[in-house]
Image: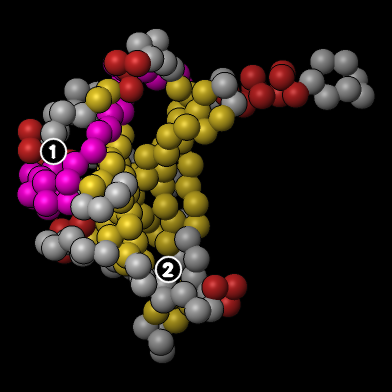
Amino acid sequence: MRQGRVDFRELAGGVMREGAEVGEEQLTVCGSEISMEGWRAAWPDLRRVMGFKYAVLACLEEIKFLKAGSVDRWPDDLLWARVFGPGGDFYCWRDGPGRLRWRVIGPPGLELPGNLGPGKSLWEEEKKAKFFVNEEAFLLWGQYDGKAEAWQERRVAAADLKYPVDFKGRVKLLCRVYSRRGRVELVWYCDLVEEGEKNAAG
């Protein structure tokens, strides 16, 4: 690269090379659709197979952040949900009355429960798809206030910040970020840890 001139292609290439390249042999990516009733029936087996730790449920009037083990009933007004942990990241969203679409990211060879329905693998359409993966960490809103017994953040003062963790420090979300052609395409939420802990996404 000549002095005084920025070669963005060269810079981007350097960034991309920092992460490992992965494909079908290292990663499961699939999705499909399911009825709300079918999803409720599939949930216990899916939770057992994937060992989820946390769940985010977005409903008409609130967003709940819970431990996955505490989710026994799925609300009728669910808009979307994300359930995740070191064993995988499952995202579903409403797509019409009584219907959900879903997508899962997980380790290679992941066997989903049969009552979830036949998921379509990304590699059925893009056999040679490859992604660069990097582990990243993001601080979530709020610092713990012992008097209020809640996480508070002036910039989002109206938000009811409640995190399903057993510590009182800043909460950090560990992720695996998958990109190709310079664009982020997949993000696997892996864990919640206290700020200061080593970044290790499982």
Q: How is the image coloured?
A: secondary structure
Residue segment shown in magenta: 20-48
Q: What element carries label 1?
A: helix
The quadrant in which the C terminus is found is top left
Residue 32 on the magenta segment: yes
Tell me what residue is drawn at x 19 percent, y 41 percent: 34
Q: Which residue occupies the extreme front position in the image?
A: 97
Q: Residue 143: percent from the left, percent from the top?
A: 48, 72
Q: What element carries label 2?
A: loop
Query: Separation of disc 2 and disc 1 at Cα?
Result: 37 Å
Which disc number belongs to residue 91? none
| Residue bearing the label numbered 2 | 169
Tell me what residue is drawn at x 17 percent, y 46 percent: 35
Q: Residue 58: percent from the left, percent from the top?
A: 34, 61
At label 1, which amino acid type do we have? Leu
Residue 3 visible from this viewpoint: yes
Left or right, residue 44 beside residue 107: left
Mark 1: few/some/many CA within 10 Å (<14, 14-19, 20+) = many
